[in-house]
Image (cartoon, helix red, strand yellow):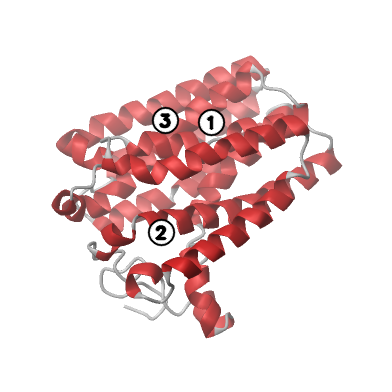
Amino acid sequence: MTDTTQTAASDIPRGGWVDSFLPRALRPFARLSRLDRPIGTWLLLFPCWWSIALARPELAEGARLFVLFALGAIVMRGAGCTYNDIVDRDFDGAVARTADRPIPSGAVSVRGAIVWLVVQLLVGLAILVQLNAFAIGMGVASLVLVFTYPLMKRVTWWPQFFLGLAFNWGALMGYAAVAGRLDAAPVLLYIAGIFWTLGYDTIYAHQDKEDDALIGVKSSALRLGARTGPALWFFYAATVACLAAMGWQAGLGRTYQALLLAGAIQLAWQVRDVRIDDPADCLAKFKSNRLFGWLLLAGLLFGHL
């Protein structure tokens, strides 16, 4: 194993850009925000970009919003991860994959993490106020989802559903930032994103199912068990069905349909090939959803042609 991969069971990459370029004092805060693991930022960002493309802004406005939402996704994903690690610090210390995260390892104190969380939220607020009033209101409302999601694994077998509600809020906000309202198409996009998250995060949760069972944390992976395969087919089929309905509602053409089909094939490959008892394969399949995100974005950008 090279020094650019994770050591032992840890999910923290070693020898990457955080270790190479950041001062030692800043590295734990970058890891607290998962800046060294961008896949979560991509999964948060894609629904925002999809929604902006769906709304068909003028080129200059679209470019501005793409940049603002990209910055917002980096900051708010970091804030969400920081809050999650504050809340879950005792659980993280009991799980092999997360035991050396900054808080349970002692690299960052709880007080330091709270200060870092406030800093990130203030930066997020500075980005949010660049949008219209309707989108600002929706952004403030999303904080309810951001701050309740980490608690869901204590009370329901389906925290992945609540993650879907939070992570796909951008499917509504991007459209609202362009149009100043919501229509049926972005709502269908939001529902599609929730099903998509149920799929990819159930795969992700299979990495921790043994530790989660021992410490009493709930997840869809534990609830579904051997029925995960059929459930994934359902989640991803519902994703594609909602996206097809959205395309019809928005009047998207054959280019969108072709790229949605390519995305559906990518999702089907995940379900067919995933090995739910192999954590490395689960992580690889989870990360592969970035390709699905790019395919759908291309379909939305060119589907109006």
Q: Residues within 10 Å of mark 2 (few under 14, many from 20)?
A: many
* Precedes in sequence: disc 1 or disc 3: 3
Report the Cα–Cα distance between label 3 and label 2: 27 Å
Of residues 158 and 140, which is closer to you in this image?
140
Residue that numbered label 3 is attached to: 195
What's the residue at 51%, 76% (across, down)? Answer: 27
The residue mark sitting in front, 3 or 2, is 2
Q: List the residue tagged with mark 1.
A: 260
- Residue for point 54% across, 50% down: 42
Q: Is residue 302 visible?
A: no
Which one is in front, 213 or 36?
213
Q: Circles 3 and 2: CB distance less than 8 Å?
A: no
Circle 2: element type:
helix
Q: Name the residue type under label 1.
A: Leu
Mark 2 or mark 1, which has the lower sequence index? Answer: 2
Q: Quadrant of the N terminus?
A: bottom left
CB atoms of marks 2 and 1 within 8 Å: no
Single out the residue that lies furthest toward the front: 111
From the viewer's side, name the closer residue of 139 and 292. Answer: 139
Residue 176 image-quadrant placement: top right
Using the rendered view, name the quadrant where residue 280 is placed: bottom left
**Which residue is at 41% across, 24% downward?**
238
Q: Residues within 10 Å of mark 1 (few under 14, many from 20)?
A: many
Answer few, some or many: residues within 10 Å of disc 3's Cα (few below 14, many 20 plus, some between 14 and 19).
many
Mark in the foreground, 2 or 1: 2
Query: Which residue is drawn at the image coordinates 53% and 55% (left, top)?
Result: 79
Tell me where residue 226 appears, x and y as whole percent.
15, 37
Q: Is residue 119 left or right of residue 108?
A: right
The kind of residue tagged 3 is: Phe
Q: Which mark is residue 86?
A: 2
Q: Is residue 144 visible?
A: yes
Separation of marks 1 and 3 at Cα, in angstroms:
15 Å
